[in-house]
Image (cartoon, rainbow, N blue to C red):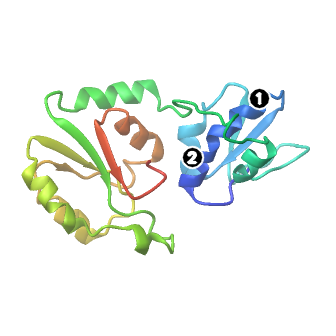
Amino acid sequence: IFNEMGLGDEIHFSMFVPELIKKNINVIFQVSNPLYELYKNFHSKIKVIKQNDLLPKFDFSISIMSLPYYLDLDKNNFPRPKKFLFADKKKVSLCNNKLSKSKLKIGFVYSGSNKNPSNKFREINIKKFSKLFTKNEDCDFFNLSNDNSTEDIAYLKNFKNVYVYSKNEMNFENTASLCMNLNLVITVDTSIA
């Protein structure tokens, strides 16, 4: 199984991958490199490889977004897993120990990938969040955006209740661990949704 669209689509359509196991199909799931750490333990019967790994021998390939068609899914048999992707339990616990227990914890994504030409249609100017930060000082806000400009980072650091992480700190597995500990996530990016 390979991906042909963005990371958000890959994450959302991955809920169909375990359906192939139910049909006794041996599955090799080739994930985008940034998602590998999050997916490496996705399912015990699914071999997960990185996008640039050497492909093992296979008989058939399919794009991840074609799985619903291949599986002949409709509104009557559409899988509805409550959760299908899990962050590492140790990282979730470690993250939980670092966060305030008394404050509401809110993650936000104001911009998707700057490489995506559609980003200009979905991004929100970070300054529009200023009222949210100042009127809710009893809340902690966590910037989950990945492509932050130097100006946006400097702006966010003006708020004592906003936490900004470097791109190196916030890979998808770390972001998932943090999200598991948040009360709310506000996002314009489907990879975080």
Write the residue at 52% across / 31% down: 83
Q: For mark 2, what is the residue?
A: 11
Secondary structure under badge 2? helix
- Pointer 1 local density, CA inside 10 Å: few below 14, some 14–19, many at least 20: some
Q: Residue furthest right?
A: 59
Mark 2 touches mark 1? (CB < 8 Å): no
Counting residues from the start of the chain, the first of labels 2 and 1 encountered is 2
- Look at the image and tell me whether residue 154 can be seen: no
Question: Closest to the observer: 44 or 57?
Answer: 44
Image position, residue 124 (x, y; %) = 31, 67
Image position, residue 111 (x, y; %) = 37, 64
Image position, residue 157 (x, y; %) = 16, 58
Q: Amino acid at mark 1?
A: Ile
Q: Amino acid at mark 2?
A: Ile
In the rendered structure, find residue 103 and report the number of the disc placed on it.
Answer: none
Q: Is residue 178 left or right of residue 55?
A: left
- Pointer 2 local density, CA inside 10 Å: few below 14, some 14–19, many at least 20: many
Secondary structure under badge 1? helix
Image position, residue 40 (x, y; %) = 61, 35
Q: Is residue 47 left or right of residue 131?
A: right
Q: Is residue 44 above or below residue 104?
A: above
The mark total stands at: 2
Write the residue at 41% across / 24% down: 90
Write the residue at 50% across / 31% down: 86
Write the residue at 68% across / 39% down: 16
Q: For mark 1, what is the residue?
A: 21
Question: Closest to the observer: 13 or 147?
Answer: 13
- Look at the image and tell me whether residue 28 can be seen: yes
CA–CA distance in space, label 2 to label 1: 18 Å
Q: Is residue 174 left or right of residue 50?
A: left
